[in-house]
Image (tube, rainbow, N blue to C red):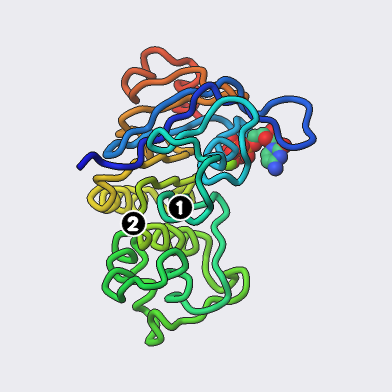
């Protein structure tokens, strides 16, 4: 069967409700199952806004956002949630156990699936280190967990769902370079059939992506592989050197 999770943005322009100027203009791209699409650009470029349009945190007024050819505006929330897992830039944990947090998108997941996701997300050691294990309690707002641990638990939660599309919004930035590299390697094996979209700050996080979109001021100014962009994109070169 054909792999699912093809994401297409067709000439998307987006304004926040009540705002005058669009924060995204004429965005068009396709992200294919089995491939990784990366989005890079300076702060305020519109990266988080862009990835929030697929799970319909906002709906576009102009253009189309399609999942396997169907506009997401024609899908209901439960369908989108089961097919698209988004790891937000500021991940949230619920007060409750780690298990409760991990099962959020898939209540019937087995313990084995939870541990498998934790291992991929490089969070297994952190959960094993206390005897309470999966029953360890997370405080309200996840305040008893560090930023990097919160990111990794949030990544594990996304993996448990086994969606067609993963959105990682700056999900690797709180990790040291070695953990980042380990996590992405493990992730590659687990997301082979899915579409992976990664928003990143560090070029090292996305250098092996199949395609990179360079976003500047709400527009895609350049696109290509890391090697192509090094040759052709002054904006990308600036990010590499920063
Ligand atoms: N913005 C807004 N209302 C919101 C969220 C964002 O008006 N609810 C604006 C921001 O002020 C910014 C633009 O939309 O001018 C793009 O924001 P965002 O998509 O969050 O930019 P990122 O590229 O994600 O920035 P960062 O790298 O800092 O995460
Ligand atoms: Mg952002």
Residue 21 placement: quadrant:
top right
Q: Is residue 110 above or below residue 166?
A: below
Q: Residue at x 49, y 24 (%)?
A: 10
Q: Residues within 10 Å of mark 1 (few under 14, many from 20)?
A: few
Q: Position of residue 189 (x, y in %)?
A: 22, 50
Q: Is residue 20 above or below residue 187?
A: above
Give the labeled residue for mark 2.
Answer: 162
Residue 226 placement: quadrant:
top left
Q: Residue at x 42, y 62 (%)?
A: 157
Q: Is residue 15 left or right of residue 128?
A: right
Gap in angstroms between the C-alphas marked 2 and 1: 13 Å
Q: Is mark 2 within 8 Å of ligand 2?
A: no
Q: Position of residue 54 (x, y in %)?
A: 51, 41
Q: Secondary structure at mark 1?
A: helix
Q: Residue at x 36, y 42 (%)?
A: 196
Q: Position of residue 49 (x, y in %)?
A: 60, 38
Q: Nearer the viewer, mark 2 or mark 1?
A: 1
Q: Is mark 1 within 8 Å of ligand 1?
A: no
Give the labeled residue for mark 1.
Answer: 79
View quadrant of ligand 2: top right
Contact check, label 2 and label 1, Cβ < 8 Å: no
Q: Is residue 195 left or right of residue 23?
A: left
């Amino acid at each position: 069967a054909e792999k699912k999770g093809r994401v297409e943005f067709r000439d998307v322009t987006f304004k926040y409700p009540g705002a005058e100027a669009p924060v995204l203009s004429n965005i068009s791209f396709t992200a294919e199952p089995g491939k990784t699409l990366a989005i890079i650009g300076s702060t305020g470029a519109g990266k988080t806004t862009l990835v929030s349009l697929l799970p319909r945190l906002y709906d576009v007024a102009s253009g189309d956002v399609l999942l396997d050819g169907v506009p997401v505006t024609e899908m209901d929330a439960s369908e989108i949630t089961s097919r698209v897992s988004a790891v937000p830039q500021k991940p949230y944990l619920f007060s409750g156990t780690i298990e409760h947090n991990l099962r959020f998108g898939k209540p019937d997941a087995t313990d084995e699936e939870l541990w498998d996701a934790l291992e991929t997300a490089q969070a297994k050691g952190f959960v094993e280190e206390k005897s309470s294990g999966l029953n360890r309690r997370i405080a309200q707002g996840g305040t008893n967990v560090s930023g990097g641990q919160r990111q990794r638990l949030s990544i594990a939660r996304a993996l448990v769902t086994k969606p067609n599309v993963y959105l990682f919004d700056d999900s690797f930035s709180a990790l040291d370079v070695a953990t980042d590299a380990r996590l992405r390697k493990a992730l590659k094996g687990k997301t082979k059939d899915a579409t992976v979209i990664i928003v990143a700050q560090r070029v090292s996080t996305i250098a092996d992506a199949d395609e990179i979109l360079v976003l500047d001021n709400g527009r895609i100014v350049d696109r290509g592989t890391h090697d192509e962009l090094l040759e052709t994109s002054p904006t990308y070169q600036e990010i590499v050197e920063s």
